[in-house]
Amino acid sequence: MGARSPSDDSPFDVPSWLHWLGGLVDRHPNFCIRLARLESSSLAKALRQVPVTMPIYVCGLARSGTTLLHEVVASHPSVATQQMKDYPMVFTPYWWRRATAKRRLQPPRERAHRDGVMVTTESPDALEEMLWMAFFCRCHDPSVSNVLGGEERHPAFEPFYRDHIRKLLLAEQATRYAAKANYHVARLAYIVRLFPDARFLIAVRSPRRHIGSLARQHEWFCQGHRRSPRALAFMQRSGHFEFGLDRRPMQLGDASRTAQIIDDWAAGREVRGWARYWDMVYSHLGRLLDSDAQVRAASLIVRYEALCESPAETLRAVLGHCSLPDCEAIVERFAAAIRDPAYYTSRFSPDDEKIIDEATADTARWWGYE
């Protein structure tokens, strides 16, 4: 969940006004699109002067370090990104930023994930997905392929999306755009067609540790959603289906493989389902990087373990890949706080570990995990 007021009793609390406004936006996407186009029309002259240059996209399965990478990139003064305060008014970023410019900054609080990440209303957030859901209504339907390839054409969405980025750049007086968008693992070829100079940061983590983190978050968020149905609605409306009571796997072109994962989860075979899901997502990415030279050239693989073991060196590589200059202060600021998390230990049995190893072996080897 996003930043909360100091009076909140639960990390999953969603204020009544935010729940109401989020529901209004969710129920009327076409109205929101028309309002966004009106905003673009009113700014047409200024937007023509704003180029979209080397947009940066952070993606990978949740719990692989994508939030940290997004925060690092977004901390650069030339970068604009969605912030927590933008929900649910994502469609009109320029007007909303003007309306909230004098909003009082709240003290940092730990986000609902209980992972030590402190957030405020100004923190970078993964909200771009709301735009994609408004135009691609089945993009989170696991019964159909969620993959968008380089051959795809969507004439209604593409100029809308470019204008959205321009408006955010204009609002923040920035020159670069960044987004954390985990579901873009299914859209990288499409995005690089839209923006041939795009930069991708692909986060990956060793299967056992990654699956352990995903399983813990899923259990925690299920508990939170049962206590607070508004929190579940918040995640659905903002495009987060990674864990919780409405967990949905991506469908990456193999319907039977996705159906098998859903069956595993439904039958209580949590570890097997997660292992198959990790393998499906990262084998898809591996094949894409092997076969698509343009996506490969745009991408930097960021291993979670390297980020924890050599944070300064890894962050320099990240910021260099993104062509963001004068970054040593950013590296020093973030590297000093990065370490391998010590707030949990593995609960997997030897049999669980065997299931993970067998399900992910070939893919893990491709990503450098033996």
Image (cartoon, rainbow, N blue to C red):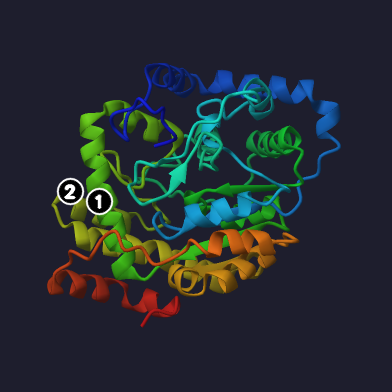
Q: Quadrant of the N terminus?
A: top left
Local crowd at mark 1 within 10 Å, few (<14), some, or many (≥20)?
many
Q: Which mark is residue 342?
A: none
Q: Quadrant of the C terminus?
A: bottom left
The answer to which of 81 and 345 lies nearer the viewer is 345
* SS for callout 1: helix
* SS for callout 2: helix
Q: Quadrant of residue 104?
A: top right
Q: Which residue is mark 2?
A: 266
CA–CA distance between discs 2 and 1? 6 Å
Q: Residue at x 44, y 66 (%)?
A: 204
State the image coordinates of residue 355 (x, y, percent, origin top left): 20, 71
Query: Does 361 sit above or below residue 246?
Result: below
Which amino acid type corresponds to the residue marked 1 in the rendered image? Ile
Q: Residue at x 37, y 17 (%)?
A: 16
For this view, does 165 lie left or right of residue 227? right
State the image coordinates of residue 155 (x, y, percent, origin top left): 67, 37
Q: Is residue 104 visible?
A: yes
For this view, does 194 lie left or right of residue 147? right
Q: Which residue is mark 1?
A: 262
The answer to which of 239 and 260 lies nearer the viewer is 239
State the image coordinates of residue 304 (x, y, percent, origin top left): 45, 67
For this view, does 85 lie left or right of residue 102? left
State the image coordinates of residue 199 (x, y, percent, origin top left): 65, 59
- Residue at the limit of the structure toward the bottom, as seen here: 370
Q: Residue at x 51, y 74 (%)?
A: 310
Which amino acid type corresponds to the residue marked 2 in the rendered image? Ala
Q: Residue at x 23, y 64 (%)?
A: 345
Q: Are marks 2 and 1 in contact (CB under 8 Å)?
A: yes
